Image: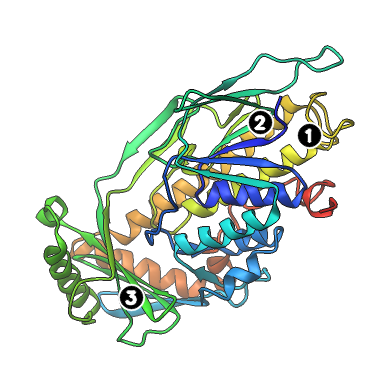
Amino acid sequence: MDRDVIIVGAGPTGLTLANLLAAAGIRSTVYEAKSAPDTRMRAIGVTPPSLEILDRCDLGTALTRHGVAVRRAEVYGDRRLLGTVSFDSIRSDYPFILSLPQFRIEQSLREAAKASKLVRLNYGVEVVAVEPAASSSANGGARPGVTVRLRDGRSVNAPFACVCSGTAGLRPFPLKRRRHYRRSFLIGDYPDTGKLGDVARLYFSRNGSVESFPLPDGMRRWIVQLTGRASQTVLDDATVSAMLTTYVNMRAGIRLPAGLPHWWSRFRPGRHELAYFARSGLFALGDVAHSMSPIGGQGMNTGIADAELAADLIAGWQSGPNGRADTGESPLGDVGSGLRMYETVRRKAARSAARRAAASMFIGTIGGVAGSALRNALLRAALTFIPGRAIASHFAMLTLPGHRSPISLTADTISSRPK
């Protein structure tokens, strides 16, 4: 059996996993169906726990040199300041949210993976199926094994396969739940001519929400809630520009630069969860396992945390007596118990993150005069009386269960293995 760990998908989750495994001296082969890296902007927020995880492969600090450190957020209700959230007091080496487009995160992860010489990246190779492979160890016991089938007809056997294929990619397990939300949002990235700097701004009005975040290179992202007929409108560049300009001016009192946004996208949030996250040497990580509303920026970061625990478990198994997972045992216990740990820890984390994302979306999109006034009053009270560190830690995902691997803090795994 090939000793490489197979990773399906070269997004931030898959590439993080490859780098963490490489830091442990473990080889991996990554298969990505797209013929080339995705250069769309997409997600932008990297939380402190994710930066700490990426530091395990010497990338956390490096990424901060390319992004914008968001240390403060201002919350407005009908254009009136309700309060601020400062991240300066949180307990982390990274007391901020790093704003950096997903494609640039992936670029740094990809370059590190290539430099390690332990990661084989394959673009334009589609995986069509993953399934347990019947196998046994030299001592007669069962051992994990996975067969990966490719579109070109080849099959690859591996001790472990990790599917990180995103919401629209290959699903290794059946769906357990799915939900579509009725809210609809429009994203537009513009030059920051208003000089709002590195402050995030959230505007909650009776007519809908607007969120704004700084981006590198003097750009700024605007996310507007679409309401009424606008949520059903067929969009083109001109319509998008008119909608963004109108909504931002009406709800936030800010005029966007003339012309088309640098990049735009419309999304309708949804949520899904697979029936299993891990079985028989097969892991599901990131958006393929659990998707959630992107409001709050928790999806990509939850996937990075998935990668940390999966990497720690695999590193422990691969460091068995023969340097591979052929005994089904390791200093961390047998493979079956490790898979159950992953299932329990990551499902709890994903559900908690999804509930937080849904709550943030619900609170921010309350409309009408009475509902909006009540929401704003409660937000003002919360921002005034709840300790600032508690609020900041919540939004920095430091209070999320499973925000770091329980093994990385207690076991002799990746961080102390020779490179």
Amino acid on which disc 1 is placed? Trp
> How many marks on residues?
3
Ranked by sequence position, the earlier of labels 2 and 1 is 2
**214 displayed left or right of 419:** left
Q: In the displayed orientation, state which residue is furthest to the right.
A: 321
* Number of the front mark, 3 or 1: 1
CB-based contact (under 8 Å), mark 2 and mark 3: no
Examine the rendered structure and indicate whether residue 120 appears above or below residue 266: above
Image location (x, y in percent) of residue 8:
53, 38
Q: Is residue 416 left or right of residue 394?
A: right
Real-space Cα separation, disc 2 to disc 1, in angstroms? 10 Å
Nearest the viewer among 276 and 369 is 276
- The residue identified by callout 2 is 160
The image's mark for residue 317 is 1
- Name which residue type carries label 3: Tyr
- Give the amino acid type for the residue marked by disc 2 in the picture: Phe
Quadrant of the drawing holding the N terminus: top right
Q: Secondary structure at mark 2?
A: loop
Does 299 sit left or right of 206 as displayed? Answer: right
* Label 1 environment density (alpha carbons within 10 Å; few <14, some 14–19, many ≥20): many
Q: CA distance from mark 3 to mark 1?
A: 50 Å
Q: Which mark is residue 252?
A: none
